[in-house]
Amino acid sequence: MTFAPDFIDLDWSEYYWYDVACKESQARLFEFSAVTWAQLEASCKKQPEAWRERLAYVLGVGDAQREVPLLVRLVVDSSREVSLTARESLRCIEASTVLTVARSNPARCGLTIVAASELTSINDLLRSVYEAQGVPC
């Protein structure tokens, strides 16, 4: 399967998106192979902000190993709206799982190994990523 951004359609109304389409998009994400997921990650920043916000909304219920690093990037590298949605999705994942993923994949989460080893909360994770990016939190 090759990545195609149309699994999130911006033409869907907001009502349809939240009632039906978000579940369909989640189901499509679950089917992504490792290659398709890598293509998603690589092209994510090129997508419109509204698309990224919808992506952030559907993440957080699947494979944490894949989703946590992407959500962290969406928090840091996006508009306020996308960042808030990504934070909400991160908080839907068990905190211990988020921290385990960040510690085992620090580079994918934008962290140094030392910073990852010192994490005690999701807030620590986000603060550390912001600091690493030179962004005030």
Image (cartoon, grey):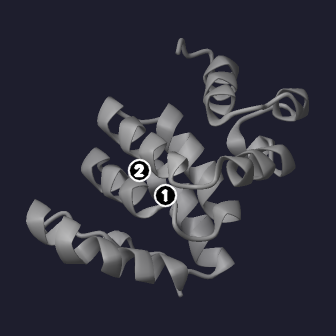
- x and y percentages locating residue 31 in the rendered image: 53, 85
| Quadrant in the picture for residue 38 | bottom right
Query: Which mark identifies residue 46?
Result: 2
Query: Which mark identifies residue 43?
Result: 1
106 lies left or right of 126: right
Q: Say which residue appears at 85% left-offset and 51% top-offset.
A: 104
Q: Say which residue appears at 49% left-offset and 58% top-offset.
A: 43
Neighbour tally class for label 1: few under 14, some 14-19, many 20 plus, Cα within 10 Å:
few
Q: Say which residue appears at 37% left-offset and 69% top-offset.
A: 5
Q: Say which residue appears at 69% left-offset and 33% top-offset.
A: 121
Mark 2–mark 1 contact, CB under 8 Å? yes
| Quadrant in the picture for residue 57 | bottom left
7 lies left or right of 116: left
Looking at the picture, does residue 84 appear above or below residue 96? above
- The amino acid type, in three-letter code, at marker 2 is Lys
Looking at the picture, does residue 104 appear above or below residue 125? below
The residues tagged by marks 2 and 1 sit, at their Cα atoms, a distance apart of 5 Å
Neighbour tally class for label 2: few under 14, some 14-19, many 20 plus, Cα within 10 Å:
few
- x and y percentages locating residue 39 in the rendered image: 56, 67
